[in-house]
Image: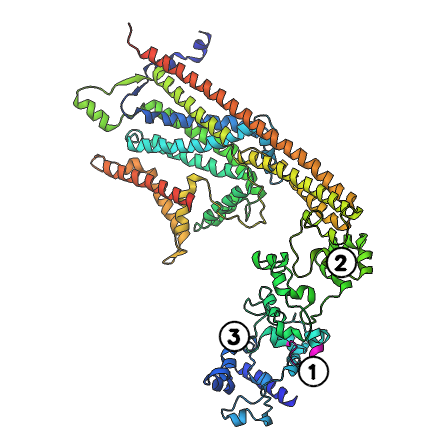
């Protein structure tokens, strides 16, 4: 009552009481947004714990991570969970995104929810790219070199962008400090704001039912069945979180994340250097491109292609409906399947070749 | 010499003009057999690439098509060069610093002077036409840069080049020198490093015998020859009780135990047992033989402990455990193993005992670290199992709660 008087929680309680989730054959895909959120919370918590010991300088970064994994009580577990959770979170975000595409949840009035979601995926990839360098090991050092070299090949803004990212002409101490800043301050700040917007929009618009399910029930003259968000859906989501925690714990304990060897900027790049799995598809595509296509550099052409593809994908809710307001279902499904097939195939090729 | 100067002058003119007429090549290219071979081979010759024609060595005037003029003695034609005259002919340019440094400022010009001190040079001077001269090693008419992999004096090909003469029993018979060197060298660690590992700095014939000044090292200088690379071992051997004894016996230091051309991979077996080299001089129960056995046992014990520790650390590392510090420490133990093997050349048990004791202490530490990592791995598995059971029980509880909420009221 005391809190009620001061915070006015009755409105929140009322909102939760009336919030519901559609029940149909594809309800399971609704859990992945929550799982991604759960893994993000784990990232924040384990990240804070790692911050207690991590030191972002080239002389101490590797050693401090080594200290965390070998000396700090449960440090190995915290670091391993942080690394595995990062990967599972990005996997969860991709599954969530494709489920939104195939269940057509991006439709009016959820365009901004889609846009904020794509921005969140971009931020997650930014977390991955900046966090990968922080242990300052051989693989992360050269992967960052390759990644920032790609940025440098962009026309006009490329060189100053690469210089800004690196804090100099090459990957070094300034890059590490700045990537650390991005990873623990800039990106979390932006992510928190966009995430709050994303969640607020999800609450505002409710959970979307796929058009085919709506149509099916409309023909029967019924409404799509719903389950109360609290406690029914919430308890199921909790089960999904526990399952995710079990998978995460098992991966972290059975396959502790390797630290590798300390980066040596003067050593030649080791053979078979490649980025994290979620950057493999574009990485392998750029590798396949010839040095020049007509008069344009192959790498530049690839980057322009990815940029256009990104814009096309971000604007999906806007081209998914034609001027007459009719949905381009086949085009959206085709584009989704094509993108999924491309990412799966090229990631596999990039990993095995 | 005037003809030679004329030839060199012409060569320089042709090189400068860029489109030099060379009737020697033109004519000999159209001939057959042995008369054509030099012209064909000369396409790859470094001298041709530097602008020198046949006349630079053979004299004559290649600007004339008529062979009677081009190959007339009046125009300095010398024809086939006698074997004994080859070194001096080559030296005409290769000992001339002013000329050679136009092509390569770092080029040595003392080859001829060295050659005269070599056994080959001395034999030639004594009238032995069969002794090796420049072209026997560098080839003739297709002489390549010494860094060219196809030159007979490239490190990978040099042993075979020397063997062409030195493995020929008939040719060597009159010099009364053995012909097994090449076969022996093929079984050596030096050959393995050179040919199998591709280490071009690994020793071949010229590394110990010299190249232009090729002379067999004498008994007293063998340790110095080996010591050019194995500096520390030479130093230890010189301080050892064996050095004065071997010197008084007139036997070559390193060669007594390791051989010369067939230097095998050394091991502790050389100190004791059936393959012991100590037994060549020391009787079975003598103090020297017993010291050898003791040193072999010390080194063997350290090897055994290092292998055991390595196994444990590898197992822990492959299970994903963080043992990098122990692996780094293990390298220190391995360094002590190397030190112990090196210390053998001092031939004192105490000298070997010190690094062995240090190595054993570190190996015990690293093995313990590996065992602790494996114990930690087991604890992690148990912790994971407990966590998974707890998660499963919680999930079952949640499922039951959902069922209860969703079951229709009785």
B165 relative to A248 in the view: left or right: right
**Same subunit, tags 2 and 3:** yes
Chain under callout 2: B
Residue that lies at the very extreme toward the top in this rendered image = B410
Name the mark on residue A11.
Answer: none
Residue of label 2: B253
Could you tell me which secondary element the residue under label 2 belongs to? Answer: helix
Magenta stretch: give its range.
B122-133
**Same subunit, tags 1 and 2:** yes
Name the N-terminal-most of marks 2 and 3. 3
A53 relative to A295 in the view: left or right: right
Mark 1 and mark 2 residues within 8 Å of each other at the beta carbon: no
The residue that appears at 40% across and 33% down in the rendered structure is A91
Q: Nearer the viewer, mark 1 or mark 3?
A: 1
In percent of width and height, residue A135 lies at: 55, 37
Residue of label 1: B127
The residue that appears at 50% across and 34% down in the rendered structure is A186
Front residue (pair A286, B107) = B107
The reply to whether the magenta stretch includes residue A236 is no
Could you tell me which secondary element the residue under label 3 belongs to? Answer: helix
A214 relative to A254 in the view: left or right: left
Mark 1 and mark 3 residues within 8 Å of each other at the beta carbon: no
In percent of width and height, residue B360 lies at: 70, 37
Distance between mark 2 and mark 3 Cα atoms: 45 Å
Q: Can residue B255 be seen in the rendering of this structure?
A: yes
Quadrant of the drawing holding the N terminus of chain B: bottom right
In percent of width and height, residue B183 lies at: 61, 63
Residue of label 3: B44
């Amino acid at each position: 009552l005391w809190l009620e008087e001061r915070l006015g929680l009755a409105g929140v309680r009322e909102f939760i009481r009336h919030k519901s989730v559609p029940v149909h054959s594809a309800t399971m895909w609704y859990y992945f947004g929550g799982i991604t959120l759960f893994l993000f919370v784990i990232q924040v918590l384990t990240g804070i714990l790692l911050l207690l010991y991590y030191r972002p300088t080239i002389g101490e970064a590797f050693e401090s991570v080594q200290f965390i994994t070998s000396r700090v009580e449960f440090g190995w577990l915290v670091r391993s969970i942080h690394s595995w959770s990062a990967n599972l979170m990005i996997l969860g975000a991709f599954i969530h995104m494709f489920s939104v595409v195939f269940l057509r949840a991006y439709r009016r009035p959820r365009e901004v929810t889609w846009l904020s979601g794509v921005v969140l995926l971009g931020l997650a990839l930014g977390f991955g790219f900046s966090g990968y360098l922080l242990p300052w090991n051989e693989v992360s050092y050269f992967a960052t070199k390759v990644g920032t070299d790609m940025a440098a090949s962009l026309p006009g803004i490329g060189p100053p962008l690469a210089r800004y990212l690196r804090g100099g002409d090459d990957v070094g101490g300034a890059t590490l400090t700045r990537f650390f800043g991005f990873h623990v301050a800039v990106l979390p700040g932006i992510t928190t704001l966009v995430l709050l917007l994303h969640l607020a929009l999800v609450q505002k618009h409710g959970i979307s039912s796929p058009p085919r399910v709506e149509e099916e029930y409309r023909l029967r003259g019924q409404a799509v069945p719903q389950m109360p968000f609290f406690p029914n859906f919430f308890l199921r989501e909790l089960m999904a979180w526990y399952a995710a925690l079990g998978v995460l714990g098992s991966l972290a304990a059975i396959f502790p994340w390797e630290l590798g060897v300390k980066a040596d900027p003067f050593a030649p790049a080791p053979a078979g250097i490649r980025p994290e799995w979620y950057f493999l598809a574009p990485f392998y595509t750029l590798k396949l491109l010839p040095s020049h296509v007509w008069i344009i550099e192959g790498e530049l052409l690839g980057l322009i292609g990815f940029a256009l593809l990104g814009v096309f994908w971000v604007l999906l809710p806007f081209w998914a409906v034609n001027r007459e307001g009719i949905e381009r279902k086949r085009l959206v499904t085709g584009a989704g399947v094509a993108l999924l097939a491309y990412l799966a195939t090229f990631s596999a090729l990039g990993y095995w070749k | 010499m005037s003809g030679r100067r004329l030839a060199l002058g012409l060569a320089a003119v042709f090189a400068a003009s860029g489109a030099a007429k060379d009737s020697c090549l033109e004519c000999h290219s159209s001939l057959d057999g042995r008369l054509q071979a030099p012209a064909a081979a000369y396409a790859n010759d470094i001298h041709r690439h530097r602008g020198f024609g046949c006349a630079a060595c053979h004299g004559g005037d290649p600007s004339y098509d008529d062979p009677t003029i081009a190959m007339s003695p009046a125009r300095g034609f010398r024809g086939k060069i006698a074997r004994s005259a080859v070194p001096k002919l080559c030296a005409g340019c290769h000992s001339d610093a002013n000329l050679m440094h136009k092509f390569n400022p770092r080029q040595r010009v003392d080859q001829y002077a060295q050659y005269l001190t070599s056994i080959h040079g001395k034999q030639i001077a004594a009238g032995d036409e069969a002794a090796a001269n420049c072209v026997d090693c560098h080839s003739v008419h297709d002489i390549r840069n010494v860094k060219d992999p196809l030159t007979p004096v490239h490190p990978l090909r040099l042993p075979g080049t020397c063997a062409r003469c030195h493995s020929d029993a008939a040719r060597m018979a009159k010099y009364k020198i053995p012909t097994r060197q090449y076969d022996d060298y093929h079984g050596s660690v030096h050959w393995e490093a050179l040919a199998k590992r591709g280490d071009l700095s690994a020793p071949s014939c010229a590394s110990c015998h010299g190249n232009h000044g090729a002379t067999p090292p004498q008994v007293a200088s063998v340790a110095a020859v080996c010591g050019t690379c194995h500096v520390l071992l030479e130093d230890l051997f010189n301080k050892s009780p064996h050095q004065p004894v071997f010197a008084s016996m007139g036997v070559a230091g390193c060669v007594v135990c390791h051989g010369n051309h067939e230097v095998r991979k050394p091991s502790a077996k050389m100190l004791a047992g059936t393959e012991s080299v100590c037994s060549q001089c020391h009787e079975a129960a003598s103090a020297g033989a017993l010291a050898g056995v003791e040193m072999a046992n010390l080194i063997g014990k350290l090897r055994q402990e290092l292998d055991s520790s390595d196994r444990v650390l590898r197992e822990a590392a492959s299970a994903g455990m963080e043992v990098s510090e122990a692996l780094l420490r293990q390298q220190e133990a391995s360094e002590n193993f190397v030190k112990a093997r090196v210390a053998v050349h001092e031939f004192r048990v105490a000298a070997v005992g010190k690094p062995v004791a240090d190595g054993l202490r570190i190996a015990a530490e690293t093995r313990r670290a590996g065992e602790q990592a494996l114990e930690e791995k087991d604890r992690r598995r148990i912790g994971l199992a407990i966590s998974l059971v707890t998660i499963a029980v919680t999930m079952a509880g949640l499922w039951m709660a959902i069922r209860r909420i969703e079951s229709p009221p009785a």
